[in-house]
Image (cartoon, rainbow, N blue to C red):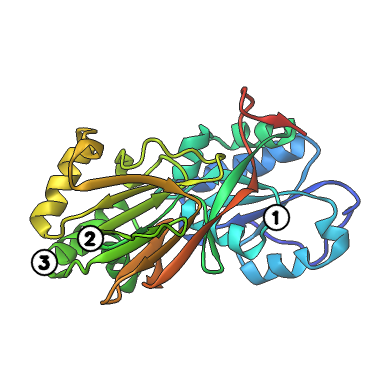
Amino acid sequence: EFHRPATFRGMDQKWIAIQRNPRAGSGRRRARLREFIRELKKHGLTPRLFSDRGRLDERLQQPEFRDNLVCLVAAGGDGTISDLVNRHPGLPLAVLPLGTENLLARHLKIPCSGQAVAEMIAAGNTRHLDLGCLGEKRFVQMVSVGFDADVIHRLHADRSGTIGKLSYLQPIWRSLRRYQYPELRLTVDDGPQPLTGRLLVISNLPEYAFHLPVVRSACGDDGQLDVRLFERGSAFQMMRYVGNVLLRRHEKLADVTVARGSKFRIESDIPAPIQIDGDPAGWTPVDISVLPGALQVFVPADGSATHN
């Protein structure tokens, strides 16, 4: 078992705050976490593991701990990353991939290895990425409105344990049968005429769930977000769009709009579901913007990283 000491000793030395997703802590994932902690110690870094978010928040409110912090580590999936980015904005972040979906880790080519991630942090290579902002909530990957957001809402409403890929089958089936596809109106950068459609994806990074190449052109450090707006709405059209996405030809369809911008307004006469980074995020209407370079994240050493 992992134990968090009642007091921290030697906090004049550099330390690492690890937020662990308790749902991602068994089997090989738990062994990977143990390896990560062991390797950090070899590099002279003090790891501290938190399963309780409140305890981490309490520690980071104290200047003597915050000033010597090297980074936060999201030991889980993209949901753990999103949680840390929103609770502790501005702090450097590292990722130990332990979740069902690890889209950011995949984009940054971070291996599923405790030793490799510890070495990456010790080397000090970081990169700055943009963040999206939906109201007050920040997101790393994407926001979508419509059918796939309805799937996410249903998935989380029925959630009783760990989410795996098979967990999506029943909510997908329910959404195919019941979702009503209200018309969405999208205004990009205060443009004079809104774009209309039934399914909207706005991406910061090109990765998407289940390896679907929905927005391949998205770039995480260009100060903009990329849009794909699917104009038709029905179960048949959703299947048609997915087929074209898999064939990488959806962007050539006459009923798919491709756009880019840094400021968005989404409205609909009937409230439409929203999801960000795989979590439910309420209903339309909503405003979305970009925070350029707001996330400092540790990455493997390559030409896109900066050494600190």
Q: Residue at x 38, y 65 (%)?
A: 266
Where's the C terminus, which quadrant? top right
Q: Amino acid at mark 3?
A: Arg
Q: CA distance from mark 1 to mark 2?
A: 35 Å
Residue holding disc 2 = 198
Residue holding disc 3 = 177
Of 42 and 277, the residue lying toward us: 277
* Contact check, label 1 and label 2, Cβ < 8 Å: no
Q: Residue at x 45, y 50 (%)?
A: 99
Question: Under tag 2, what secondary structure?
Answer: loop
The image shows residue 194, relative to residue 110, as above or below, that is below
Instruction: Please provide percent x and percent y for residue 112.
Output: 50, 36
Of 38 and 85, the residue lying toward us: 85
Instruction: Please provide percent x and percent y for residue 106.
Output: 46, 37
Toward the bottom, the furthest residue is 270
Count the numbered circles shown: 3
Q: Is residue 1 visible?
A: no
Q: CA distance from mark 3 to mark 1?
A: 42 Å
Q: Is residue 206 left or right of residue 114?
A: left
Q: Is residue 192 left or right of residue 300?
A: left
